[in-house]
C-alpha cells in the first residue's frame, strides 16, 4: 500500500480524507479576517488551512482574459482580479503560519512565483501546486528541489502532461507526490465534475496517492466530496469562506464551517458503515442471531427408539441449536437412540 506524509498525518489509500480548506484570497486583503478563517477551518475539522501567494504583476499580463463565470465574478481580466488581493507580503505569511500553529492546523499557501517558493519554504512541510502550473516545468523543478512532498492538482490536463510533471518532480528531488483530480471551471457544474476520473488516475498512477480538488457548489449533503472520497480520494481540497453569500472571487463555490463539519460527520458515519474488516465473517454481535435465527432439523411426529429417519420424519425450524439442515442427507437413514416426540429439535446425541 502507498503512503504519503502530510504534516503530522500519514495518508494511505484507506485513510479518512486529509482536508485542505482553501481560504485562497477569501480574506480579501484583511489579515484579521484571514486569521478568523484559519480558526473556522480548524473548528470545522480541516487538516490544513491554505492560502494563495502571488503578485498580479508576476502572474499574468495586463490583458489576460478571464476563465470564470462573469455572473458571479464580473472582473474581466486575470491581472485586474489578482491585483485586488495580492496585498500580503512575506511577513504576513509568517504571521498566518504562526497563527495556524497556535490553533493547531497545518499552514499551506500555493506559491505562484519563484520568490514565493523561497519565502514560503520554511513555513510549510509540503507544497500544493495549482493545476495551471502543471506544465510549468522550471517552476516544478524549483519546488521539487526543496525535497518536500508535493500535492499537484491536475485540472485541464492530459495523462501525458501529468506524467511529464510527475517525472520532473521525481527527477528533481521530490520523492512523494500526490495527484488531485480537478476540473478547472469556476464554478464546476455537477455534470462536469467527472469524479470517475479519480479511478482513472488510480489506474494510471497506481503508486501515487490520489485526491480531489472541488469547485462545485456545496450542497446540504456534501455529495461531491463524499462521492469523491468513496471513489478513493484521500486528500480533499475545497475553497473555504466565512460567508457563502458574498459576491465575487471564490466565495460563491466555497464551503463554510457548517459544510465542513457536516462533511466530517458524513465521513465518520460512512467509515463506520464500511468498517475495518474486508474478509466476510460473522461478527461477535451476530452470534445470537446465528444461533437463534437459523434452523435445526425438527421431528414431524413422535418416533420410537431404533427408528431409521426418512425425509417424511423431518422438517426445519428455528432456532439453530440442533443439527443444521446442511446435514439433511447425512441424517437420513440413521437410527434414533431413544424415543422422541413431535416438534423436538434433533441433536447428534439422539442418533445411534
Image (cartoon, rainbow, N blue to C red):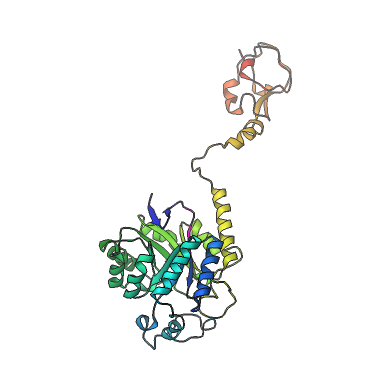
Q: Measuring from the top left, give residue 180's x and y in whole percent.
A: 42, 64
**Quadrant in the picture for the C terminus:** top right
The residue under the point 57% across, 37% down is 283
In reply to whether residue 17 is colored magenta, the answer given is yes
As rendered, which of 294 and 71 lies closer to the eye?
A: 71
- Which residue in the rendered view is the most extreme toward the bottom? 63
- Is residue 209 in sight in this rendering? yes
Q: Quadrant of residue 89?
A: bottom left
Q: Which residues are magenta?
A: 15-20
Frontmost residue, 159 versus 125: 125
Image: 187 above or below 61: above
* Residue 233 visible somewhere in the drawing: no
Q: Position of residue 84 (x, y in %)?
A: 46, 83
Q: Is residue 113 left or right of residue 83?
A: left
Query: How far from the left and from the top, in percent, is residue 295?
Result: 65, 30
Q: What residue appears at the point 48 percent right and 57 percent down from the top-left corner?
A: 17
Instruction: Between residue 114 and residue 231, name the one nearer to us.
Output: 114
27 lies above or below 348:
below
Q: Position of residue 134 (x, y in %)?
A: 35, 70
Would residue 259 be counted in the magenta stretch?
no
Which of 231 and 88 lies nearest the eye of the viewer?
88
Q: Is residue 99 above or below residue 265?
A: below
Please say if 129 is above or below 274. Answer: below
Q: How many marks?
A: 0
Amino acid at each position: 500500500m502507498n503512503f504519503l506524509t502530510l504534516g503530522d498525518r500519514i495518508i494511505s489509500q484507506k485513510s479518512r480524507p486529509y482536508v485542505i480548506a482553501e481560504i485562497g484570497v477569501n480574506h480579501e486583503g484583511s489579515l484579521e479576517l484571514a486569521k478568523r478563517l484559519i480558526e473556522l477551518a480548524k473548528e470545522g475539522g480541516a487538516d490544513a488551512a491554505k492560502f494563495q501567494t502571488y503578485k498580479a504583476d508576476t502572474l499574468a499580463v495586463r490583458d489576460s482574459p478571464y476563465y470564470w463565470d462573469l455572473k458571479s465574478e464580473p472582473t474581466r481580466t486575470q491581472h485586474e482580479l489578482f491585483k485586488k488581493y495580492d496585498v500580503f507580503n512575506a511577513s504576513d505569511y509568517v504571521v498566518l503560519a504562526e497563527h495556524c500553529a497556535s490553533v493547531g492546523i497545518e499552514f499551506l499557501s500555493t506559491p505562484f512565483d519563484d520568490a514565493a517558493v523561497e519565502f514560503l519554504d520554511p513555513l510549510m512541510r509540503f507544497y500544493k501546486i495549482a493545476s495551471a502550473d502543471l506544465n510549468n516545468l522550471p517552476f516544478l523543478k524549483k519546488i521539487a528541489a526543496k525535497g518536500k512532498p508535493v500535492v499537484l492538482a491536475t485540472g485541464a490536463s492530459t495523462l501525458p502532461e501529468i506524467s511529464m510533471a510527475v517525472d520532473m518532480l521525481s527527477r528533481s528531488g521530490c520523492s512523494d507526490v500526490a495527484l488531485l483530480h480537478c476540473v478547472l471551471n469556476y464554478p464546476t457544474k455537477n455534470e462536469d465534475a467527472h469524479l470517475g476520473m479519480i479511478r482513472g488516475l488510480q489506474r494510471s498512477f497506481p503508486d501515487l496517492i490520489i485526491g480531489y480538488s472541488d469547485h462545485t457548489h456545496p450542497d446540504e449533503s456534501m455529495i461531491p466530496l463524499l462521492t469523491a472520497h468513496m471513489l478513493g480520494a484521500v486528500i480533499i481540497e475545497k475553497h473555504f469562506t466565512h460567508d457563502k453569500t458574498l459576491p465575487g472571487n471564490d466565495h460563491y463555490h466555497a464551503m463554510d464551517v457548517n459544510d465542513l463539519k457536516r462533511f466530517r460527520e458524513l465521513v465518520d458515519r460512512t467509515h463506520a458503515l464500511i468498517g475495518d474488516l474486508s474478509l466476510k465473517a460473522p461478527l461477535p454481535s451476530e452470534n445470537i442471531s446465528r444461533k437463534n435465527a437459523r434452523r435445526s432439523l425438527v421431528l414431524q411426529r413422535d418416533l420410537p427408539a431404533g427408528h431409521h429417519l426418512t425425509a417424511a420424519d423431518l422438517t426445519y425450524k428455528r432456532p439453530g441449536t440442533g443439527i443444521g439442515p446442511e446435514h439433511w442427507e447425512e441424517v437420513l437413514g440413521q437410527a434414533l437412540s431413544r424415543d422422541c416426540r413431535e416438534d423436538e429439535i434433533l441433536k447428534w446425541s439422539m442418533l445411534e
